[in-house]
């Protein structure tokens, strides 16, 4: 089954404790992206990757890191989480070509930082 | 000014009516336009894409695009309670992807 998976689905952590949210897709998509969703603010892009070893900042990259060492994986790293990073996070991937912007989303990771 | 603007709603329509959802965008580079549906607590799912001016129909859904007015809309005919969700307008131009904040649709029995 074609899908985007994220782990964990739910995470409660404390300020300053490094964490990684994994994202994996099995559709051989080149483009991958991370979003956060907050009430009233909608989906905001954190980072995106056009292909392996190619990443770039989105609209809200502060406090986040990403890497793209393999085509299928695009982990999101919070080196020192803070309460303002409490949010719902989505990973998404897209095929190349005209369908580039047709994104397939993972199930989401609900992160709470206390 | 937000790059993609949507009325947050809620938009309430009776079952069987036509729901009309609207979106304006400011970036003239945008070439691709999409509507996503998101149920509460779930991930967004793509329901319509449109690339050229005019209308595109798919079942009960019609997307309308007017690039000169920088306006894209989604019509849902014969609205059903299962259509109750938040609808996100999304534009793509180059590598930059921008979502609107979404319109909440409620279809009432």
Image (spheres, coloured by chain):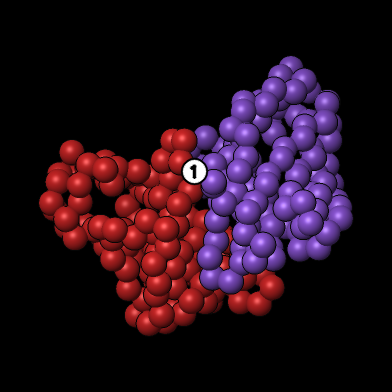
Chain colours: A red, B purple
Relative to A76, say whether A83 is above or below: above
| Label 1 neighbour load within 10 Å: few <14, some 14-19, many 20+ | some
The picture places residue A93, in percent across and down from the top left corner, at 52, 66
The picture places residue B106, in percent across and down from the top left corner, at 66, 25
Residue drawn at x 18%, y 38% is A114
Q: Which residue is mark 1?
A: A42
The picture places residue A61, in percent across and down from the top left corner, at 34, 60
Answer left or right for A68 relative to B14. Answer: left
Relative to A72, say whether B106 is above or below: above
Relative to B94, say whether B7 is above or below: above
Residue drawn at x 43%, y 45% is A37
Answer left or right for B30 relative to A33. Answer: right
Kindly identify which chain the residue marked by label 1 belongs to: A
Task: Kindly tell me whether residue B89 is visible in this rendering.
Answer: yes
Residue drawn at x 66%, y 77% is A97
Task: Kindly tell me whether residue A70 is visible in this rendering.
Answer: no
């Amino acid at each position: 089954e074609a899908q985007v998976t994220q782990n964990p689905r739910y995470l409660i952590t404390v300020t300053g404790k490094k964490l990684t949210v994994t994202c994996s897709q099995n559709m051989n998509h080149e483009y991958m992206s991370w979003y956060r969703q907050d009430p009233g603010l909608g989906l905001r892009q954190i980072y995106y990757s056009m292909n392996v070893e190619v990443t770039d900042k989105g609209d809200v990259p502060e406090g986040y890191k990403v890497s793209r060492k393999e085509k299928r994986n695009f982990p999101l790293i919070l080196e020192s989480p803070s309460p303002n990073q409490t949010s719902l996070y989505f990973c998404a991937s897209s095929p190349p070509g005209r369908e580039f912007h047709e994104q397939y989303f993972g199930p989401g990771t609900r992160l709470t930082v206390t | 000014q937000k790059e993609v603007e949507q009325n947050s709603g809620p938009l309430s329509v009776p079952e069987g009516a036509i729901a009309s959802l609207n979106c304006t965008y400011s970036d003239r580079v945008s070439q691709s336009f999409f509507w996503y549906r998101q149920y509460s607590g779930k991930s967004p799912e793509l329901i319509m894409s449109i690339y050229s001016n005019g209308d595109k129909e798919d079942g009960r859904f019609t997307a309308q695009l007017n690039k000169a007015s920088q306006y894209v809309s989604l019509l849902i005919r014969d609205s059903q309670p299962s259509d109750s969700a938040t609808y996100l307008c999304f534009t793509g131009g180059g590598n930059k992807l921008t979502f609107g904040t979404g319109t909440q649709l409620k279809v009432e029995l």
